[in-house]
Image: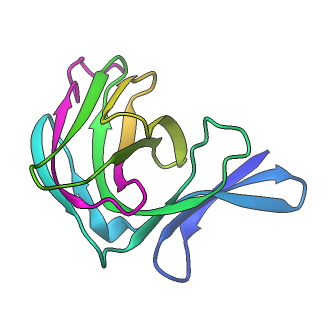
Amino acid sequence: MSQSSGWSSTGAWLTTLALVAGSTAPLMMYTPASAAPLSNGEVSGFIRAGMPAIRFRNQSKKNAPFERALGEEYTFTANRGDELEFQVDPEDGSNLQAILVLVSLPSGKQVAFTDRSNFLKYKVPTAGQYKLLVLAKGTTRGRYTLFTEGIGQTAATP
């Protein structure tokens, strides 16, 4: 199995993984220009019609299909041992049902996923860059508040 990453012809970051000799399948596709830096605390977001769709896949399910969903991307640096918690609270009047996808960068490997609750928890095994995708399930849309805890809570280890 081999892996490569790079910019696509459309300007998106693409990670591919060779599953069988001669064949490749994209793991995730990102639009780097939309990623916002993330730290502990609260962030307001808004998922609305007309936003670019983000291509993703629930890698914890065998043979899960690729999907596209509207959403927003956040990046941050985590230390080994950080116990990350993310919670999405839709604002009043919003019908947003969130999908949360946590990805280790630059590999593009999904490390945590939920489409059943607005809460995601993850203990970081390796220090590095991570990306959180907050996506809208189906046709749901709206404003939300993202609460984050645990980023950089442990001392960086060499």
Q: Is residue 79 visible?
A: yes
Q: Where, by quadrant of the figure, is residue 142 drawn?
A: bottom left
**Residue visible at 53% across and 49% down in the picture:** 108
> Is residue 141 covered in magenta?
yes
Numbered marks: total? 0
* Residue 98 spot, x, y in % from top left: 33, 47
Q: Is residue 16 left or right of residue 93?
A: right
Q: In this view, does 27 lie to the left or right of 81?
A: right
Q: Where is residue 75 in the image (x, y as percent from the top left)?
A: 30, 49
The residue closer to the viewer here, 73 or 124, is 73
Q: In the displayed structure, would residue 46 be above or below residue 37?
A: below
Of all residues shown, which one is farthest toward the bottom?
9
The residue located at (56%, 60%) in the rendering is 67
Viewport quadrant of the C terminus:
top left
Which residue is located at x 55 percent, y 83 percent? 9
Q: Report which quarter residue 130 is drawn in.
A: top left
Q: What stretch is highlighted in magenta?
A: 133-158
Quick check: can you spot residue 30? no
Q: Quadrant of the N terminus?
A: top right
| Residue 106 forms part of the magenta stretch | no
As drawn, is 138 to the left or to the right of 48?
right
Foreground of the two, 83 or 116: 116
Residue at the (35%, 33%) spot, across then down: 117
Using the image, determine if residue 71 lies above or below residue 111: below
